[in-house]
Image: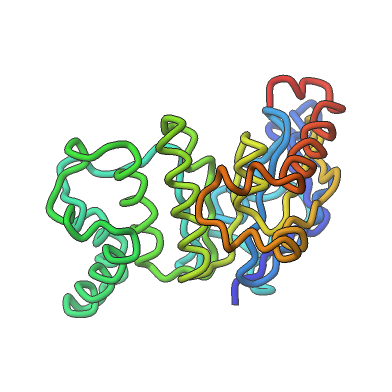
Amino acid sequence: MGSIRFKNVDKVFGPSAGGVKVLDDINLEIAEKEFVAIVGPSGCGKTTCLRMVAGFEPPTSGEVSVNGKVVTAPGPDRAVVFQQFALFPWKSVRDNIDLGLRNKNLPKVERDERIAAALRLMNLESHADAFPHQLSGGMQQRVAIARAYVLDPEVLLMDEPFGALDAQTRVVMQEELVRLARVNPRTVLFITHAVEEAVYLADRVAIMTRRPGRIKEVLDIRKVREAENWDRMTRIEDVMDLESFVHLRTQIWKSLREEKGANSV
């Protein structure tokens, strides 16, 4: 399970009369274990969409549902990875990962097993006893992702998770996320400003208009990936050199540039 659905979703911040309308009639369905990225001009409501799925923000009208149930609050079926790593500096890697499990009141034996699995998944075993200040930005984000995965969520919500990383580390983490999607797939809603990142990672890319944000179009990347067997390539630069990748990237950029303010994407 893990499907997501936006049905006729509007969002207005402030009073209904005179407030700021951020989202306008959003309709989007994300299938179980599908990876969907949302791109759009700054301020178009991308993160607001994610926050609604997380249960942090209610729609003004319409419905957001997960597995057919209307979202009214955060829940254990959804985990969020933010741009800022949000690790507790006084806790070790192991204890940061353990935090959510403690809140679920799981037995220590089960917690230890799940933490060990998350450490292996993110290649963090040798850093289990390190503290955040001893880690690079990329390693800290690995911990944040491990903390999400250890909860075994059906839905993974990622809000520009690599936006604070340097260019080289960002590429490494993108390749790592592709690896994770193969070995431990989840339904993923991924927010990004980076067009190339969206094309490389996602099964589909939803393009939003300027505010109030609407779904302008949705591109099916997975069909192209499967037709040209992108998955045989382990390095992002190999994929980015493909004519099909360049075509999709250009198509998205053209769509964004049609929106007023797209130069701030």
How far from the left and from the top, in percent, is residue 185? 52, 69
Instruction: Choose between 39 and 1: the one closer to the eye.
Output: 39
- Corner quadrant of residue 19: top right
Which quadrant, please, contains the N terminus? Answer: bottom right
Q: Is residue 44 left or right of residue 25?
A: left
How far from the left and from the top, in percent, is residue 205? 73, 50
Q: In this view, does 107 lie above or below 38?
A: below
Q: Residue furthest left?
A: 129
Q: Is residue 174 left or right of residue 207?
A: left
Q: Which colour scheme is used?
A: rainbow
Q: Is residue 165 above or below residue 6?
A: above
- Corner quadrant of residue 225: bottom right
Q: In this view, does 76 lie above or below 251?
A: below
**What residue is at 16 percent from the left and 48 percent from the top?**
91
- Corner quadrant of residue 106: bottom left
How far from the left and from the top, in percent, is residue 46? 66, 41
**What residue is at 53 percent from the left and 40 percent from the top?**
160
How far from the left and from the top, in percent, is residue 69? 65, 72
Which quadrant, please, contains the C terminus? Answer: top right
Q: In this view, does 77 lie to the left or right of 22?
A: left
**What residue is at 49 percent from the left and 34 percent from the top?**
163
Instruction: Choose between 49 and 173: the one closer to the eye.
Output: 173
**What residue is at 36 percent from the left and 45 percent from the top?**
141
